[in-house]
Image (tube, helix red, strand yellow):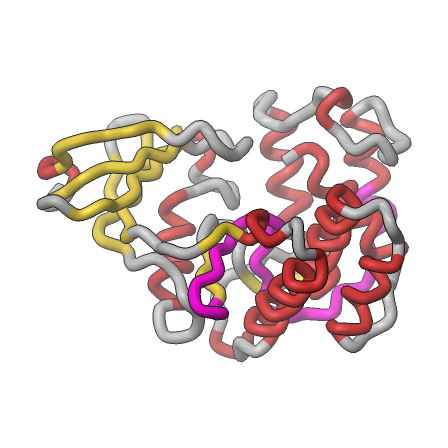
Amino acid sequence: MKYINRITSVEKSLEGMSPAEVYKCRIDETTYYLKTINKVFSQTTYSVKREAAVMRWLTDKLNVPEVLEYGETEDSEYLIMSEIRGRHIDDFAETPLQYISYLVKAIKQLWSIDISQCNFSSRLDMRLQELDYLLQRNLADVDAVNWQDTTNFTKPEELYLWLCNNRPPEELVFSHGDIGANFFVADGEIYFYDLARCGIADKWQDIAFCVRDIRDYYPDANYERIFFEMLGIEPDYPKIDYYILLDEMF
């Protein structure tokens, strides 16, 4: 506990829907972030132990926070990381083409990573097992009020069964796993955070979350078309729909 005992001030962040708690803190007059989560999530992609390992692996591959310290208490995991600066991606929403171009840039940077040496999996086998774990322990978001208006399910067990029975083939890349709002931009460079869900996964997972955000911001379907033109691929809407549904209970 080299660093955690030196924290001089703490301010809790109220952003995000993750079960983790995030605190802005000061150590030796420098700002850092402390992230904690109950150990009941240690076998899931909410684990900050997993996040610390991913961040260390990504250090020379992407712009990510530096891990200062990872540790455990009797009932929780904690991670202390450096602060990343810049403008949040959502700050660019008023300029749609710039916003979309940064989404595309972020995705292409993730895809550029060689997955042959990656030991982190976020493939569907793992994610569906994780969802089952959360459902069995009443840790999943099963309140349909929180789900997308386009989701045609109201019962979590029906949605889970559908996800298991309709798994699409996977086109594997390095995926962020929760890309939508989890990066900053500074001097045109992308700085990623909330990295616990990173790993080898279907490329359409990150695309689906970007499409979901573009639809939320811009009712004009032309912006979605522009996104795919910038990305240089044709949309696969069954896969996009699948991954949006997969995220409903997380």
Above or below, 66 against 20 in this view is below
What residue lies at 68% left-to-right and 33% top-to-bottom? 249
Q: Count numbered badges in the picture.
A: 0
Q: Quadrant of residue 84?
A: bottom left
Pinpoint residue 174: horizontal percent, then vertical percent: 58, 68
Please identify the quadrant where the C terminus is shown.
top right
Q: Is residue 184 shown in magenta? A: yes
Left or right, residue 214 beside residue 28: right
- Near-viewer residue (121 or 28): 28
Residue 144, percent across and down?
77, 23
Left or right of residue 250: residue 151: right
Residue lying at 18% horizontally and 39% vertically, measured from the top left? 26
Front-lying residue, 14 or 173: 14
Q: In this orientation, which residue lies closer to the viewer: 74 or 108?
A: 108
Residues shaded magenta: 163-189
Relative to residue 176, is residue 46 depicted above or below?
above
Instruction: Tell me, yes or no, whether the highlighted magenta stretch contains residue 117.
Output: no
**Residue 212 in view in this figure:** yes
Can you see residue 202? no
Q: Position of residue 31 (x, y in %)?
A: 23, 45
Residue drawn at x 79%, y 33% is: 148
Query: Compared to 40, does 121 lie above or below?
Result: below
Query: What x and y, as percent, mark residue 152?
Result: 90, 32
Would you identify the image quadrant in which residue 247 lies? top right
| Quadrant holding the N terminus | top left
Residue 13 appears left or right of 210: left
Q: Residue at x 31, y 51 (%)?
A: 83
